[in-house]
Amino acid sequence: EATKGYAAKVAKNDASKHKELSQLCLKYFKDDKKVMAVGEKSAKKALELLEQQDLYMNYGRILYHNGKKQEAIDLLKKAIEVAKVKGEPTQLIDFQLRDWGIVN
């Protein structure tokens, strides 16, 4: 309940606060399905607010952890496309996909 309250009252429309909340959920409560659901929602909100590579990675990791592997893979493949359009390097995304057994 505290995580939901933080997301609603403090993080609101702040991508960095949503990212931080989602990372804390994964770091300290990775075995708590309810908390991880909040973490997933918060990671998604962060990405919706600000489309940047680290937020794709964060959301993808949480999806993967939550058993939504194909969704996570698809998300990171989209992140590669976005990064290429922006002229950004994709090594970290490529590494994460390889770590999951996906070769691009």
Image (cartoon, rainbow, N blue to C red):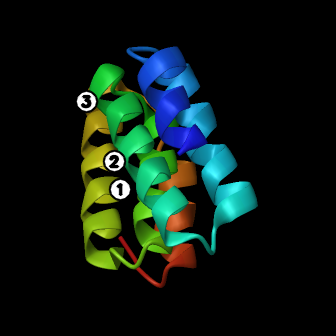
Seen at 52% across and 37% down, the residue is 54
Q: Residues within 10 Å of mark 2 (few under 14, many from 20)?
A: many
Q: Nearer the viewer, mark 3 or mark 1?
A: 1
Give the secondary structure at mark 3.
Answer: helix
Q: Position of residue 62 (x, y in %)?
A: 48, 60
Contact, mark 2 vs mark 1 (Cβ under 8 Å): yes
Amino acid type assigned to the residue bearing label 2 in the image: Ile
Amino acid type assigned to the residue bearing label 1 in the image: Leu
Distance in Å between CA atoms under marks 3 and 2: 9 Å
Give the secondary structure at mark 2.
Answer: helix
Please give the residue where the numbered disc 3 appears in the rendered image. Answer: 85
Q: Residues within 10 Å of mark 3 (few under 14, many from 20)?
A: few
- Numbered badge on residue 76: 1
If you read the primary sequence from the N terminus, does the residue marked by circle 3 or circle 2 appear first? 2
Q: Is residue 22 left or right of residue 15?
A: right
Seen at 27% across and 36% down, the residue is 82
Please give the residue where the numbered disc 2 appears in the rendered image. Answer: 80
Location of residue 64 (image quadrant): bottom left
Q: Position of residue 88 (x, y in %)?
A: 44, 30
Locate the C terminus and report the quarter of the image it occupies.
bottom left
Seen at 32% across and 21% down, the residue is 49
Relative to 40, is 21 above or below?
above
- Numbered badge on residue 92: none
